[in-house]
Image (cartoon, helix red, strand yellow):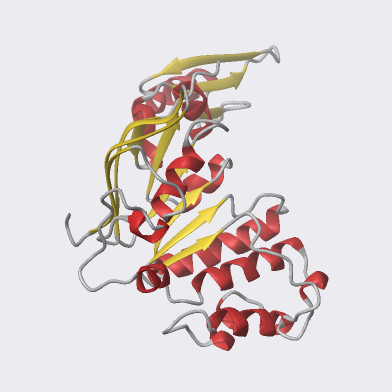
Amino acid sequence: MSDDVAIHVRGLRKAYGDNVAVADLDLDVQRGEVFALLGPNGAGKTTTVEILEGYRQRDAGEVRVLDADPSFAHGSRSGGSRAPGRSVRDWRGRVGIVLQGTGEFDELTVAEVVHHFAGFYPDGDDPDKVIARVGLTAKAGARTHTLSGGQKRRLDVALGIIGRPELLFLDEPTTGFDPEARREFWELIRDLSAAGTTIVLTTHYLDEAEALADRVGVIAGGRLVEVAVPAELGNRQDALATVSWRTPEGTSESAQSATPTALVAELAARFGGEVPGLTVTRPTLEDIYLRMIGHS
């Protein structure tokens, strides 16, 4: 396993009775990158991530997370091996996990919760600095039940990074956010990535994956269909562009073209300048994703 690789998976398999949740999955996640794992419900996404986090046992395959087999953190006796000199507590301290809901601390303040969690780690970060980092300084003295949805999610992230993790798992981090709160949260993720944290993100929002991820992986039917940068997933960069315009009679026309610039120039010459109602579009990441998972 290369020092540049944070997660290394080969032949991962997990079944529940006759239902194969993950089938022969191979994956590498580089240190310092933001990797988005996409897939419909029941595709095997959650099972894969839980195995990587050390919370679920696999049936077969090789898995290394931060140079250790995460099954040792689960108390496995089936061959899981830790990195030399690493204890379970030490490895756990290097991995941050932000679930869809960390818990309820209604009667505690933001500062009390973060300070409490900092004590779980041998080298926890400064709680007040973490609160500032996630943008909650103004709410440090507020009880958590008074926080907005976006502020509670920021608190979840604070608890996920208080141990100074090298690797951070984010599970559907902006579900239920309004557009402004989502954009603010994206900036927080970009800041964490810029500081060198490796991030594995699961999301159903395709624009979120495109905005944040260095690479995306699409999982369907327990299999990893493809891994690529968002702009190249499913050969998206080579897909035909759709050029649409409005005729002098007011009707709409469109054509697909591999050379949309040439077509637009031809239309401009035909119209003698500006082309009314001109739009040029290529398939979105969502279009490509839906095609890959078998939706029309």
Q: Look at the image and tell me in which quarter the N terminus lies.
A: bottom left
Q: Is residue 41 left or right of residue 285?
A: right
User: Is residue 114 shown above or below 58?
Assistant: below
**Residue 211 percent location from the top left of the image:** 49, 50
Q: Position of residue 91 (x, y in %)?
A: 36, 68
For image coordinates 25% across by 60% down, the residue present is 67
Whether residue 283 can be seen here: no
Q: Residue at x 52, y 25 (%)?
A: 290
Q: Is residue 212 above or below residue 25?
A: below
Drawn side of residue 229 relative to residue 18, left or right: left
**Left or right: 120 as drawn, with respect to 25:** right
90 versus 41 height, above or below: below
Furthest-front residue in view? 77
Residue at point 30%, 48% (across, down): 78
Res 296 quadrant in image: top right
Q: Quadrant of residue 230?
A: top left
On the image, the x and y values in percent for residue 17 come to: 47, 26
State whether residue 268 appears in this view: yes
The answer to which of 105 and 266 lies nearer the viewer is 105
Where residue 46 sits: x, y (%)? 51, 42
In the current view of this chain or complex, which residue is farthest to the left?
2
Towards the viewer: 162 or 279: 162
Left or right of 140? Residue 260 is left
Q: How many numbered badges does the structure rendering display?
A: 0
Residue drawn where x is 39% and y is 51% of the image = 52
